[in-house]
Amino acid sequence: MLTNNEITHLETYSYKKISKSNSAKIEQKILKSSIYNKEASVYLDLFSGFKALELEAVSNHINRWEIKYMKSLENPEQKIYSINRMLKYAAAAILILSFIPLGYLLMNKEMNSEKIFEANFSPVLTQNYYTSRSKAVDNKINLSKGISAYILEDYSEAIKYLNIYIDNNNYGDFDNNSNNIELYLGISYLAENHLKEAKNIFEKISNKGTEIRQQHTEWYLTLSHVKENNIQKAKEQLKSIRSQKLHLYFDKAIQLEKQIEVLKINKN
C-alpha cells in the first residue's frame, strides 16, 4: 500500500499543485512500476471524484442517474449480464455495479450456503463517499486509503482505515455521508467473515440515507444471513426485496430464492 507521502503527492498531482519536475517523476513511476500504477490509478480516480463531488450540481446529477437506473429495472424481461466488475464514472464520481452469473448454479447439486454466498457477493461503491466537510487532511488520507483498499478488495485494510476515518470524523446519528462509508465497512466485514459486525452495521443504517443506499444495505444483510446459513432470515429479507418491484436487487433476489430452494432439496 502507498505511503501517506506518496498519496499526498498524488493528490497534489491530481489537483495540479505540483512542479513540472515532480509531476514528471510521478508519471515515470507510473510507467515503470505496474504495482504503483495499479494503486496510483485508484487514488487518482478517487481524487477526481473528490473534486467533482465538491460541486453540488454533481450530487444532483448522480441522483438523477440513479433514478434513471432504477426505472430501467421496471422491464421484467431484463437480462442479467455476466460481468465480473463494471466501473462506471459519472461526472467523476465512482459507481461500481457488479453482476455475477447465477443461473448455472441451479444445476449444481453440491451447492452449500457458503458457495451461494460467494456466487452472489460482489462489492458496490455508491455515490457521495466523500464530503468536503472533512476537515483534517490526515483523516482524508484515511478515507482515501480505506476506499482504495475496498476497491482493491483488501478488506482487512479497508476495515482498518474506514474505522479510523469514522472514529475521527465524529459523525452524527443521522449524517448521510456516514451511511455510505459504513455500508462499505459493513461489506468489508462481511467479506472477511465478521458476520456480527457486518450485521450490526447493516441493521444500524438500514433505514437511513437514500432509497438506493437502503436497497444496497438490505441486499447485503440478506447475504449475511445466507453466509451464516440462517435460511429462514434470508428468506424473510428476500420476501421484503421482492415486494418492491423497482428494487435494485429484485431479479437477483428471485434467483437467490431459487438457489436456496435447491439447497433445501439437496439437504433432504
Image: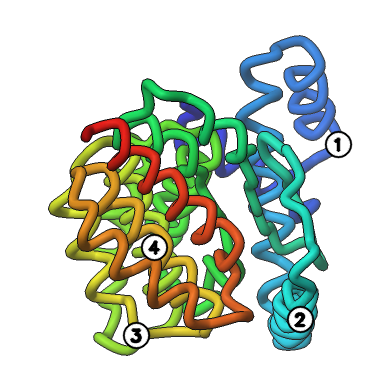
SS at mark 1?
helix
Work out whether residue 232 or residue 262 is closer to the camera in this orientation and state it: 262
The residue at the point 46 percent across, 50 percent down is 258
Q: Residues within 10 Å of mark 2 (few under 14, many from 20)?
A: few
Q: Earlier in the sequence, mark 1 or mark 4?
A: 1
Calculate the distance from the C-alpha at mark 2 to the C-alpha at mark 3: 21 Å
Q: Amino acid at mark 4?
A: Leu
Residue 107 position, x and y percent, is 53, 28
Which image quadrant: the C terminus?
Answer: top left
Q: Amino acid at mark 1?
A: Lys
**Residue 88 is at least partly visible in this image:** yes
SS at mark 3?
loop
Q: Earlier in the sequence, mark 4 or mark 3?
A: 4
User: Which residue is disc 2 drawn over?
Assistant: 71
Calculate the distance from the C-alpha at mark 1 to the C-alpha at mark 2: 47 Å
Using the image, tell me which numbered label, if any, was put on residue 129.
none
Nearer the viewer's eye, disc 1 or disc 3?
Answer: 3
Name of the residue lying farthest toward the top: 32
Q: Residues within 10 Å of mark 3 (few under 14, many from 20)?
A: some
Calculate the distance from the C-alpha at mark 4 to the C-alpha at mark 3: 12 Å
- Check if mark 2's residue and mark 3's residue have beta carbons within 8 Å: no
Calculate the distance from the C-alpha at mark 1 to the C-alpha at mark 3: 48 Å
Answer above or below: position of 88 versus 229.
below
User: Which residue is disc 3 drawn over?
Assistant: 207
